[in-house]
Image: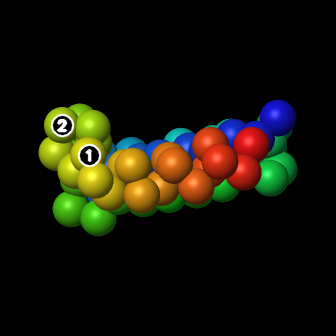
Amino acid sequence: MPVLAVGGEHSVGSYLAQTLRPVVPDVEEAVIADSGHYIPDEFPEALLAVLAPFLASA
């Protein structure tokens, strides 16, 4: 199953992807620059830029 771990730079960053790797070796990771916890509210365009290609490839 494809998995995308998205974290805000000033929140979880890459930590979410790191914690998933033991159970999901092929997890895709994205860190949204300058974002905190509320990525969809803070940087919706950046989230869409990561999410749309991921969903299109699934």
Residue behind mark 2:
41
Residue type highlighted by circle 2: Asp
Q: Residue at x 74, y 43 (%)?
A: 58
The answer to whether mark 1 and mark 2 are in CB contact below 8 A is yes
Q: Dot 2, crowdedness within 10 Å: few (<14), some or many (≥20)?
A: few
Q: Residue at x 21, y 62 (%)?
A: 34
- Quarter of the image with the N terminus is top right
Q: CA distance from mark 1 to mark 2?
A: 6 Å
Q: Is residue 18 visible?
A: no
Res. 6 mark: none
Q: Residue at x 66, y 54 (%)?
A: 28
Which sits in the foreground, 54 or 27? 54
Query: Farthest residue toward the bottom?
Result: 33
Residue 44 sits above or below residue 31 on the image: above
Residue type highlighted by circle 1: Pro
Tag 2 secondary structure: helix
Residue behind mark 1:
44
- The x and y percentages for residue 7 are 41, 48
Which sits in the foreground, 27 or 47? 47
Which sits in the foreground, 54 or 1? 54
Which sits in the foreground, 35 or 43? 43
